[in-house]
Amino acid sequence: MNTKREKPNVLIADDSSVMRTLISHVITKLGYKALTANDGEACIHTLNSDKVDLLLLDLNMPGKNGMEVLSYLKANDMVLPVIMITASDDISQAVQCIKMGAYEYLTKPVKNDRLEITVSNALSESSLKKKVQLLEKELKQQNIFRRIYGESSALKRCIEQAMQVMETEVNVLVIGESGTGKELFAQAIHNGSKRKNGPFVTINCAAITNELADSLLFGHVKGSFTGANSDHTGFFEQADGGTIFLDEIGDMSLDIQAKVLRVLQERKIRKVGEKKEKSIDFRLISATHRNFSDAIKNKTFRADLYYRLEEYPLFIPPLRDRREDVPLLANHFLDSFCTANNIESISFSASVLENLSKYDWPGNIRELQNIVRRAAINRSGDEITSVPLLPHAHSQEERAARSPSDQPHVEIPALTGPQEQRAPDKPLPETTVPERGNTLLLKNAELQTILKAYELAGGNQTKTAEILGISRSSLYRKLKKFGIEKNLSFSVTKGL
């Protein structure tokens, strides 16, 4: 592994070729790389085109002088140590340069030993500041994203993007499948922003109807309509000075989209029953799992609102794109569940963690959390060696939206043994119910109901339980009562 450090670049900006040559000699002798510029314009060009670690800047140059270059650095948030070098010994000028951010002020002619010490100290102090800033950034990141677990490169890229945008006022559109943790990222962005001390207001856009939209979003005054028995502060006003999070904004109706667009443009609201508008100050973060391209094409989502929302898109990777995080998440959910329920420490076997990592998780992190909880409940010892059969109870729309390559393909062992899959259109099979060694005619109405539900569910036990309105564990107990818990595909013998 090559651990050789890159030489720091020192830019020497001076209109005197003699000074540039003399200072370059000192810089090279110190082991640094010397860059040169003969005026202020050339200096700014080099600052924008090359990595510069230290600037030695002449005060009096043609084009832009040293003070103008300092102003440019400040205006463009370019942070680097600057050593002013000039023939003038004007104290007031030196004080002004220091106030503008210069590290040191040297007068010509500069002695080599003084220059060497000043350059070395400036670079050492700058390096230390960078290390401190990096450490502060890492600590801030750990604190803000403490509820988001994972070490995968896909997740780290996402967190880095969130860190870059959080301190701005840009609207953020968080994009990701259901269960990926979009709200956690929205909350983290708020917590790391300048508005962290302000409110964080979450709105479930799918739950807002056209009839209640004005009152819920913008508020109302007492007596403005039947049932308005008191003043009500709307969501946008509640978020004044903070952040408003529009969750699943892709489910918002066109009528409400128009109202939200106007608030984003004007930054003003008017309560129902009130004549005057009120200015509000908020930052907008929205989230969706939907495809906006299709929605805009089908005219179910306004393009002008979309472009307001997507000032900065943040894509949250699905769990199948960060498989290395699955064991970490599974263990975290298991520990949390055990702590919350006063359960002694239990763990996953290595084979279970391996199988969990191979599964595609169409329900993402939320599905994993549910599976872990069920596995903890159904355990038979202090180690989980198998997990409940992973449900596939997703809607046809969700399944159709996933490409064939995205479909789950790994089977994870079930506690109740394998299920046989059978097309739902096949007739109900005959059934043999063993009872005390005799073959009896099936007359039990409860079992008939279970079998019918099993047929409607296409052979899936989880769906069978849902149709019957009972839990899967209850279904298993009922099947065990009939002695058929291992397999629902059995024969019915008619007659005694």
Image: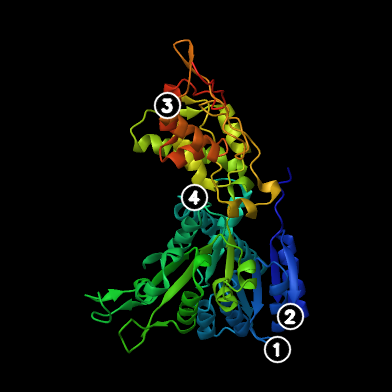
Instruction: Measure how far apart labels 3 and 1 are at the Cα level.
Output: 98 Å
Of tags 3 and 1, the one toward the viewer is 3
Q: Amino acid at mark 1?
A: Gly
Alpha carbon distance from label 4 to label 3? 50 Å
Provide the residue designation for mark 1: 63
Q: Residues within 10 Å of mark 2 (few under 14, many from 20)?
A: some
Disc 4: which residue: 148
Residue in the foreground of this view, choosing between 487 and 347: 487
Distance CA(mark 1)–CA(mark 4) = 51 Å
Residue 385, position in %: x, y? 52, 25
Q: Relative to the observer, which residue lies in front, 300 or 250?
A: 300
Residue 153 % position (x, y): 63, 49
Instruction: Determine which residue is flagged by label 3.
Output: 444
Q: Earlier in the sequence, mark 1 or mark 4?
A: 1
Asked if disc 1 and disc 2 are in contact, CB closer than 8 Å, the reply is: yes
Q: Earlier in the sequence, mark 3 or mark 2?
A: 2
Numbered circles on residues, count: 4
Q: Earlier in the sequence, mark 3 or mark 1?
A: 1
Q: Choose the circle earlier in sequence order: 1 or 2.
A: 2
Residue in the image at 44% along x and 37% along y? 373
Q: Quadrant of the N terminus?
A: top right
Q: Which dot marks residue 42?
A: 2
Q: Earlier in the sequence, mark 2 or mark 4?
A: 2
Q: Are marks 3 and 1 in contact (CB under 8 Å)?
A: no
